[in-house]
Image: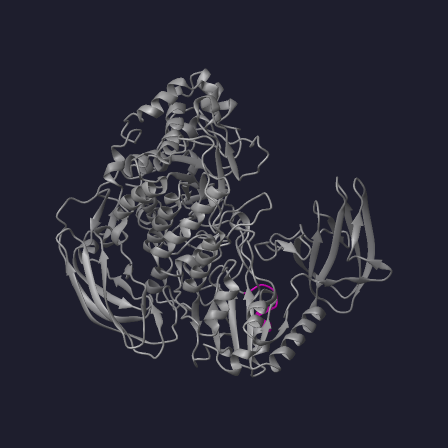
Amino acid sequence: MVPGVSRRDALRGLGGALLAATAGGVPMAVAADRGRPGGADGGRFSARVEGLLARLTRAEKLMLVHGSTDPTGARPIGFTAGVERLGIPPLRFTDGPAGVRLRRGRASTALPAPVMLAASFDPRLADAYGTVLGQEGRAFGADVVLAPMVNLMRTPYAGRNFETFSEDPLLTAQIAAAEIQGIQAQGAVAAVKHLALNNQEADRLTVDVEIEEQPLREMELRGFEAAVAAGVGVVMGSYNKVRGSYACENRPLLTDLLRGEWGFTGWVVSDWGATHSTAQAITAGLDMEMPGSTHFGAALGRAIADGSVPEAALDTAVGRILSVQERFHLLDEWPPGRPDHDAASGARTALDVARAGATLLHNPHATLPLSDERATSLALIGPTALRPFVSGGGSAYVDPAHADSPETVFRERGAQVRTALGENIYGHPLVAPSTSLDDLRVPARETRTMHALITVPQAGTWTWVLHHSGAAPHLLVDGVDPFRPVPGSEFAVGGLLRTAPGGFVLRRCTTELTAGTHRIDLTANGGAQGQQVRLRHLSESTRAADLAEAVSAARAASTAVVFAYEDATEGHDRTTLNLPGNQNTLISAVAATGTPTVVVLNASGAVAMPWLDEVAAALHMYYPGQEGARATAEVLCGDIDPGGRLTQSFPTDDDSHATAQDPGRYPGTGSTVTYSEGILAGHRWHTATGTAPLFPFGHGLSYTTFEHADLTAEAERDGSLTVRFTVTNTGDRPGVTVPQVYLGPSPDLTANQIGQPPRILAGYRRVSLRPGRSKNVTVKVAPRQLSSWSTARRAWVLGTGSRSLWIADSAEDLRLAGTVVLGAAGGPAQGGRGLGFGGSQGSSGAEPKVTLNLH
């Protein structure tokens, strides 16, 4: 290290230099990376790494390429052993999409969901977000932070849409690059995920994705390319197959593209359990198996011993891992120094992101911001009014350092608050003669079964709700397990429904019951520590009572605020855009009271809104993290302007989006999903087909008004474009706007039979202005964003000729229009090898045979 330069400053400087390559939204491989020792060009590693490789035994090298158990007793998400005699420390991994996820019962900063970060349209805020992840990752003992996720939002049903950024490749690339810089400036290694095409949870472990090369290059891969350009240290391979080959053993992706074309010099780790072979995986470019050693442990040792895998392949994988450790100074001290946890800074960033990403969807009569009596006499309705909805489920869930509910925050602000659940998501006690099913206690090492008869007065929908400690109890209703017989009948348990009051695990499922008597059998096993079980329910009668309570509360208040939720999680896709349970009926019933009704959405993304014209306003707060209640109150009351813009199109219903048009597109047929929409995904599909969305990409309202003027554009000699215009706040309040630059297709590309969308997002700027103030805005559009991938030429081709240009408030709200003529760039087009994907050949060690060549 340079004397007098701290480790953090050195890493920040390196990250900034690498990130500069993405200026203007053009992720380009950094030329300096290609010539680094250990790069894809076959160069050697640094002298230090080569020296370590020479001294490591084969057994020690094997220890470095697979996961194992932390001998200290800690439970990190992932762990690889070090080699103490050579000063190589172990590596600890932590989940990090929305905060550092700990498994030791310790809380960390629960940041807003990444989709809410992207809704800010602010890469500088993404850097701050990454700074929290990196700082807390290292403070809590981790070296690698598994973030960001950059897979595009392709279908609104995808269960992990809240974990990623956008349906648009430019926005995804820029937010991802900035977040990576923030993480790695703290000395933590970022692991971008999941390469590639992990765009759905349905059949995610085995689904085979068919996609043409142009949409692959222009859409899904842009975020990963930007990550490499930003200097990301680790790339995580995905579970799914890509054109017949599992992603973690896919040589065209991991070697030809990632290293050969982009110049990536870090290491590739499998998603947890995504390694499927030994010889094929390591020779294809996978460097590390997680979380165990099935394929890269003893099996790899045997393959090297019998000659089916050359030892050089193991040396290369180990060298890549050690090179990243060297770059991040993880080889300089053992154990490495750790910073103190800066909880206050994390909380400030969480609040900043929740404020910036708050997206006002609907406010036709300026009901918001609330003021005077409308802000002080409130009915807060819905489960997430009383319990803070912090995180989505799965690996992105974070136990918050603290989190207030909206009820608490509004009471602290001096409001008179009435509350109602609207629908009790935790269920009502089940009353059965002479039997209590609400508190079954089973001593350790015993098994007990409770039998009960219940009488159902009328046929209807019942939701069974189990709260339990220990292992899941077994429920039978009339001899049938309601959790198992109907696919999809069990509710996906996400961040809100992962626990019940008292810390119990919660499970829900919905069935139909006929009128009459039904037998309940509930079996619980005490295990080693005993078990406690509650069986509760929701029925037509309980829902009616909950609804009546909400309507009564709304009538007694000056403003009703309904907090609606959709509880998404890794491992499950949604089955509909409708809000779960009885929420649509609840919102309409509250609005029908005549009390001005505001809907606050805590959802992963798009939801259907059949009640939209009945309510006064709708505010999207996503999964807003530990400071979400405070940010929500500030936006509703006008302390700050809602600055978020949609990063995804909101369809009107389940039939009005690109992936609804063909089951082969989603969820797939015969374990294959075909991206036949090509480059027309998301807002591009809506524009191309003329299908009006409920809300378009980029939509978001302000409490003030803005005008745009003075549009000019200048084509630069290098093929880039400089767009200039003026924005003026014409209202009487400070506010935020996000003007967006869109470009039409190139006639020259069309003439060369290269497909293009009718409009692409070419750039944007987040602008804050006081009343009456103006700002001159400049947006640089780099050649990559003006180019399309030509499969025939195996290159990016600049879209020259006369192209339409728009300044817009969303993909459908075009404010200024013009035309720009682009000439040929000064240099040659950036070429590539083209990607070919074939079927797997097992673990013979041979390269996969290319049966389909995309070029």
Coordinates of residue 73 in the picture (x, y in percent): 59, 34
Using residue 140 as the reference point, say whether residue 531 is left or right of it: right
Q: Is residue 386 visible?
A: yes
Tell me if residue 246 can be seen: no
In the image, 794 versus 507, the foreground residue is 507
Tell me which corner region of the image, top left, top right, bottom left or bottom right, holds residue 564.
bottom right
Q: Position of residue 23 (x, y in %)?
A: 26, 51
Provide residue 335's location: percent of width, then percent of height.
47, 32
User: Which residues are drawn in magenta?
Assistant: 579-586
- 687 part of magenta stretch: no
Q: 707 or 217, which is in the foreground?
A: 707
Q: Quadrant of the N terminus?
A: top left
The outermost residue toward the front is 4
Q: Residue at x 46, y 21 (%)?
A: 85
Q: Position of residue 650 (x, y in %)?
A: 43, 64
Q: Which residue extends farthest top?
A: 306
- Above-or-below relation of 449 to 352: above
Query: With respect to residue 139, does 323 lie above or below?
Result: above
Q: Residue at x 23, y 39 (%)?
A: 31
Indicate yes or no whether the magenta region holds residue 581. Answer: yes
Q: Quadrant of the C terminus?
A: top left
